[in-house]
Image (cartoon, rainbow, N blue to C red):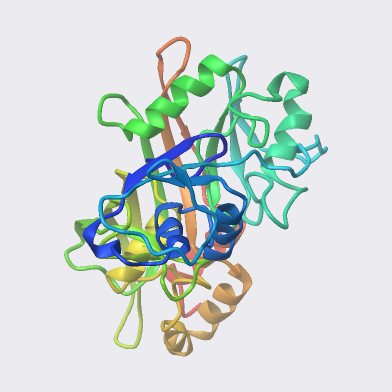
């Protein structure tokens, strides 16, 4: 089963827990990339069959062991266009380009965001040779960072490189050198200071724009963390932690850390309930956090095997100015 990416087939059997549920609800559970309303439109368009018969009614009640097959229709939005957007390039050759993505930049065009993305910038920087690499809508993209997460990203410039990097990211370093490290600032200090978070992630049943920890119907997700430093005293504590991903789910680090009670500073989606802690911070830290205006998460390191030479390559990105300022204030909160 896939997550509903363009042109690919999704096939699954109805489980006992989904027996008798509406078709649109079940489809939304299996397609991470789509809301329930989008699934309703897809069903009505005749893109789904059950036991070989086309079903176009979202209210249809599914039965256990029925076989569902869904093929994502081709998108009809315009192909992304090149845009002269400055990029901070960490490395580039004929096969790959490694950039330091700033916070606030969306990786690829999507509903409501057709311009100003990393893809638009890459098409301008790399020229027409990039078009279509790995797909027309997301040329060169093999992994993503959230809009407000900064740091190291890699893109492919050839089909061979795209296939190699995609395989490495899908393998998550089990059989190769791939390694991704994120640094985050979180509320409180996790105990133990080193650990593994193993909890399934799926679309939130309460808010379709968010992810959540689910007991069933989600996707396996594993995050390893290590406390790098701790700050604070009696009234407040904040930790800087390093995270390694064993899987790559949407919002994984943010969801997992919130789940264990240590949400990221500044996270507008998964830090709800932690805002009251802000008033316990020294004023200099309150101002730094307000200036941050995003989740305190940065992709600091990336290690890969070069897709054509096989050479092990390591890339890193220092904290951008906003996180550097936050870090300084945490180290000297009374200055």
| Residue shown at the point (72%, 54%) measured from the top left | 113
Q: Identify which residue, 255 or 154, lies in the foreground.
A: 255
Q: Residue furthest front?
A: 53
| Residue shown at the point (51%, 52%) measured from the top left | 33
Which quadrant holds the N terminus?
top left
- Could you tell me residue 195's position as x and y percent? 19, 56
Judge from the rendering whether residue 218 lies leftward or rightward of residue 55; answer left or right: left
Q: Is residue 250 something that shows in the picture?
A: yes
Q: Report the number of numbered marks.
A: 0
Judge from the rendering whether residue 87 lies leftward or rightward of residue 63; answer left or right: right
Q: Residue furthest left?
A: 192
Q: Identify which residue, 267 or 172, lies in the foreground.
A: 172
Q: Is residue 87 something that shows in the picture?
A: no
Q: Identify which residue, 321 or 108, lies in the foreground.
A: 108
Q: Residue furthest right?
A: 84
- Could you tell me residue 118's position as x and y percent? 68, 42
Judge from the rendering whether residue 119 lies leftward or rightward of residue 71; answer left or right: right
In the rendered image of this protein, does residue 42 appear above or below residue 75? below
| Residue shown at the point (77%, 21%) measured from the top left | 128
- Could you tell me residue 27's position as x and y percent? 44, 56
């Amino acid at each position: 089963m896939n997550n509903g990416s363009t042109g690919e087939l999704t096939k699954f059997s109805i489980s006992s827990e989904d027996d008798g549920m509406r078709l649109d609800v079940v489809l939304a559970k299996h397609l991470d990339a789509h809301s329930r309303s989008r699934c309703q439109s897809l069903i009505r368009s005749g893109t789904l069959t059950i036991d070989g018969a086309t079903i176009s009614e979202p209210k249809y009640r599914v039965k256990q062991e029925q076989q569902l097959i869904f093929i994502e229709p081709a998108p009809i939005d315009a192909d992304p266009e090149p845009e002269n957007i400055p990029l901070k390039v960490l490395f580039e050759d004929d096969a790959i380009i490694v950039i330091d993505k700033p916070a606030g930049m969306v990786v690829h065009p999507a509903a409501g965001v057709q311009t100003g993305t990393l893809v638009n910038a890459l098409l301008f920087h790399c020229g027409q040779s990039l078009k279509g690499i790995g797909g027309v809508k997301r040329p060169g993209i093999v992994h993503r960072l959230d809009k407000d997460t900064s740091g190291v990203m890699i893109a492919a410039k050839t089909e061979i490189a795209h296939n190699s990097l995609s395989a490495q990211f899908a393998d998550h370093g089990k059989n190769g050198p791939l390694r991704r490290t994120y640094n985050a600032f979180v509320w409180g200090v996790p105990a133990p200071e080193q650990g593994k978070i193993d909890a399934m992630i799926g679309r939130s049943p309460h808010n379709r724009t968010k992810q959540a920890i689910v007991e069933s119907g989600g996707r396996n997700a594993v995050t390893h963390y290590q406390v790098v430093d701790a700050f604070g005293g009696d009234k407040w504590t904040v930790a800087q932690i390093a995270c390694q991903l064993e899987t790559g789910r949407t919002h994984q680090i943010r969801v997992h850390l919130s789940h264990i009670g240590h949400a990221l500073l500044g996270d507008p989606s998964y830090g709800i309930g932690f805002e009251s802690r802000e008033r316990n911070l020294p004023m200099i830290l309150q101002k730094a956090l307000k200036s941050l205006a995003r989740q305190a998460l940065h992709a600091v390191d990336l290690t890969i095997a070069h897709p054509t030479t096989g050479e092990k390559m390591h890339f890193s990105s220092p904290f951008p100015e906003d996180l550097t300022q936050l870090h300084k204030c945490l180290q000297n909160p009374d200055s």
